[in-house]
Image: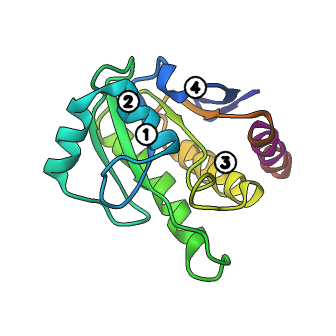
């Protein structure tokens, strides 16, 4: 599924984020930027040790923010390491922190003149964020950002399974229909 927002394309696809041919991929990172499981582990394995070397130099990243490194051996030139919240109950700032992780990532892409960026579904794996809620935050943040930032030409959400893809599809459909 894809839509045009301002002059940019926002698209959804089911697949492997490590194989994306975008200038940057976003990593669902932990606050120590220490690698881990899920998307984080896959990006570090596919990108090689150069990514971890840069992460160690950076030292860490607060929840709700992001940092940028090389893409190592990935097709993507850059990895934007976004730290989403661990979900407790939705009443401990989780929505604002998740929104911040997406917005900070988009801001880093703009500042680094990155034209295309691929996102995973941040915080919905090991961090337990409900996919429907996370999809609404992710899509609305991207749509709002693209309305006033034409420098990013493509924002792609690369979703690892059909259920997650469908949740993002529902979120995109409802947000576009509201406008």
Q: In the picture provided, is 54 more to the left or to the right than 163? A: left
Instruction: Bin the neighbour count of mark 4 within 10 Å (Cα to Cα): few under 14, some 14-19, many 20 and up.
Output: some
Distance between the Cα atoms at labels 4 and 3?
A: 19 Å
Q: In the picture provided, is 46 more to the left or to the right than 154? A: left
Instruction: Decide which of 107, 80 is in the foreground and name it.
Output: 80
Where is residue 115? Give x, y as percent. Answer: 42, 27
- Which quarter of the image is occupied by the N terminus? top right
Question: At numbered mark 2, what does the secondary structure look like: helix, strand or loop?
Answer: helix
Distance between the Cα atoms at labels 1 and 3?
A: 24 Å
Q: Is residue 9 above or below residue 121?
A: above
Label 4 vs 3, first from the N-terminus:
4
Instruction: Bin the neighbour count of mark 3 within 10 Å (Cα to Cα): few under 14, some 14-19, many 20 and up.
Output: many
Q: Quarter of the image holding residue 157?
A: top right
Distance between the Cα atoms at labels 2 and 3?
A: 27 Å
At 29% from the left and 36% from the top, the residue drawn is: 112
Which span is picked out in magenta? 165-173
Label 4 vs 2, first from the N-terminus:
4
Q: Which residue is mark 4?
A: 16
Q: Is residue 52 above or below residue 122?
A: above
Instruction: Decide which of 109, 123 is in the foreground and name it.
Output: 123
Question: At numbered mark 3, what does the secondary structure look like: helix, strand or loop?
Answer: helix
Q: Which residue is mark 2?
A: 45
Q: Which residue is mark 3?
A: 139
Label 1 vs 4, first from the N-terminus:
4
Q: Which residue is mark 1?
A: 41
Q: Nearer the viewer, mark 1 or mark 4?
A: 1
Distance between the Cα atoms at labels 4 and 2?
A: 13 Å
Q: Is residue 50 above or below residue 170?
A: above
């Amino acid at each position: 599924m894809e839509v045009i927002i301002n002059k940019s394309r926002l698209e959804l696809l089911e697949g492997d984020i490590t194989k994306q041919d975008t200038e940057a991929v976003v990593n669902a990172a932990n606050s120590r930027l220490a690698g881990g499981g899920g998307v984080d582990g896959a990006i570090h394995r596919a990108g090689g040790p150069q990514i971890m070397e840069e992460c160690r130099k950076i030292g860490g990243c607060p929840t709700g923010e992001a940092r940028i490194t090389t893409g190592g051996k990935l097709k993507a030139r850059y990895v934007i390491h976004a730290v989403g919240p661990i979900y407790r109950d939705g009443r401990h700032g989780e929505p604002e922190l998740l929104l911040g992780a997406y917005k900070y990532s988009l801001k880093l892409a703009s500042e680094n003149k990155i034209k295309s960026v691929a996102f995973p579904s941040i915080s919905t794996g090991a961090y337990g964020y409900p996919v429907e809620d996370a999809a609404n935050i992710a899509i609305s943040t991207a749509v709002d950002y693209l309305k006033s930032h034409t420098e990013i030409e493509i924002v792609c959400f690369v979703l690892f399974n059909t259920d997650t893809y469908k949740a993002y599809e529902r979120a995109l459909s409802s947000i576009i229909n509201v406008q």
